[in-house]
C-alpha cells in the first residue's frame, strides 16, 4: 500500500505537492469515489482517476549513474544547485529519483529509479547490500584505526556494523593514503564520519561498487539502464542476502 499522492506523483501526473492539492480539491477518485483525505493508502489493484482521467502506471525504469562531483542527490534543490536528475532531463521523461544518496562532493555509482518499492528495498537497513568506496584520506591510518573501522566504531548515532577495510596505498612524505572500505549501512556521511573518527579525514570519496554493480564503461556524468536481470538480482540479493552473480 502506498499513499495516494505518492502514487499520483510516481505515475508522472504531477509533483507530490500538486498531487496533494488535486486530492484536497476533490479532483481525485479511487474506485469511482472522490477521496479528499491526504493519508489515504491505495494498492496496485485500485483504480485511480485524476480530473476524470484514469491513471496509467508509468513504466518502471532503473538507471546506474556515474555521479559527478558538485551534484546533489535529490530531485530538486532549494539552493539552486545542480541535481542528479538534471543529468537525465533531456532523454528520460519518467519522474526518477536517487536510490539513497551520495554527498554533494562524492562521486561514483548511484542508482536512480521511479520504482518506490525497489528503492525502499535497496535502502532499508534490514537489507544488507554491500557498497564499496575508495577514500583518499589526510594522514595515514594506523593499523589500530583500520581495525576499529573493521570491527565497528562508535559514532554519534551509534556503533557502525563491521566493515571491510584495506589501505591500498600511502605516501608518507605527503601524509596521505588511499583506502578501500565496504559497508552495508547507509547512514548520513557515514564513510566520512568513520575516517574522521580515526583521525584521518576523507578528502576525496568515490563509490566504486553497489552489490555486484560497478562503473565499468562510464565516465562521470554518464549513465546506463540496468538490465532486467540486474534488477531481478538486486531484488533477490536484498531479500535473501544471497545471489549467484555469475548466473
Ligand atoms: N559515505 C559518505 O560519507 N558519503 C557518501 O557520499 C556516501 C557514503
Image: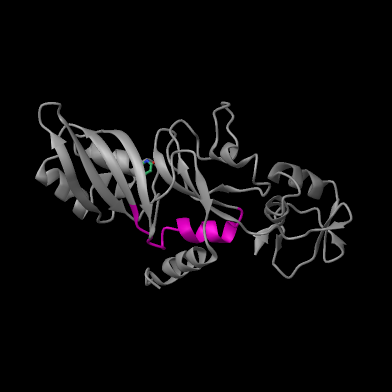
Residue at 59% from the left image edge and 29% from the top image edge: 78
Residue at 46% from the left image edge and 47% from the top image edge: 110
In what quadrant of the picture does the N terminus appear?
Answer: bottom right
In what quadrant of the picture does the C terminus appear?
Answer: bottom left
* Image quarter where ligand 1 lies: top left
Q: Is residue 179 left or right of residue 24?
A: left
Residue 99, percent from left and from top: 50, 50
Looking at the image, how many numbered discs can be counted on the residues? 0
Q: Residue furthest right?
A: 52
Residue at 60% from the left image edge and 36% from the top image edge: 76
Magenta stretch holds residue 117: yes
Q: Give the quadrant of residue 106.
A: top left
Residue closest to the eye, 55 or 39: 55
Query: What's the colour scheme?
Result: one colour
Residue 139, percent from left and from top: 17, 31
Q: Which residues are magenta?
A: 114-131
Residue closest to the eye, 182 or 47: 182
Residue at 73% from the left image edge and 70% from the top image edge: 45
Residue 41, percent from left and from top: 69, 61
Q: Give the quadrant of residue 171.
A: top left
Where is 132 relative to 77, above or below? Answer: below
Q: Is residue 185 left or right of residue 22?
A: left
Residue 130, percent from left and from top: 35, 57
Magenta stretch holds residue 23: no
Amino acid at each position: 500500500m502506498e499513499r495516494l499522492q505518492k502514487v499520483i506523483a510516481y505515475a508522472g501526473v504531477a509533483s507530490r505537492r500538486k498531487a496533494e492539492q488535486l486530492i484536497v480539491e476533490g479532483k481525485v477518485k479511487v474506485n469511482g469515489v472522490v477521496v479528499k483525505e491526504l493519508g489515504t493508502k491505495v494498492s496496485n489493484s485500485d483504480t485511480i482517476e485524476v480530473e476524470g482521467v484514469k491513471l496509467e502506471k508509468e513504466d518502471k525504469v532503473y538507471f546506474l549513474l556515474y555521479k559527478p562531483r558538485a551534484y546533489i542527490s535529490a530531485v530538486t534543490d532549494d539552493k539552486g544547485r545542480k541535481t542528479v536528475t538534471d543529468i537525465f532531463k533531456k532523454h528520460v521523461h519518467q519522474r526518477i529519483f536517487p536510490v539513497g544518496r551520495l554527498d554533494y562532493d562524492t562521486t561514483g555509482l548511484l542508482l536512480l529509479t521511479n520504482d518506490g518499492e525497489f528503492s525502499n528495498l535497496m535502502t532499508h537497513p534490514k537489507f544488507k547490500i554491500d557498497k564499496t568506496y575508495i577514500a583518499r584520506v589526510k594522514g595515514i591510518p594506523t593499523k589500530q584505526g583500520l581495525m576499529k573501522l573493521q570491527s565497528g566504531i562508535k559514532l554519534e548515532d551509534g556503533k557502525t556494523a563491521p566493515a571491510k577495510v584495506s589501505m591500498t596505498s600511502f605516501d608518507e612524505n605527503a601524509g596521505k593514503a588511499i583506502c578501500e572500505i565496504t559497508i552495508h549501512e547507509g547512514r548520513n556521511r557515514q564513510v566520512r564520519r568513520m575516517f574522521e573518527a580515526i583521525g584521518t579525514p576523507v578528502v576525496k570519496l568515490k563509490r566504486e561498487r553497489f552489490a555486484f554493480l560497478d562503473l565499468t564503461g562510464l565516465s562521470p556524468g554518464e549513465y546506463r539502464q540496468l538490465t532486467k536481470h540486474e534488477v531481478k538480482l538486486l531484488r533477490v540479493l536484498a531479500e535473501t542476502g544471497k545471489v549467484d552473480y555469475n548466473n
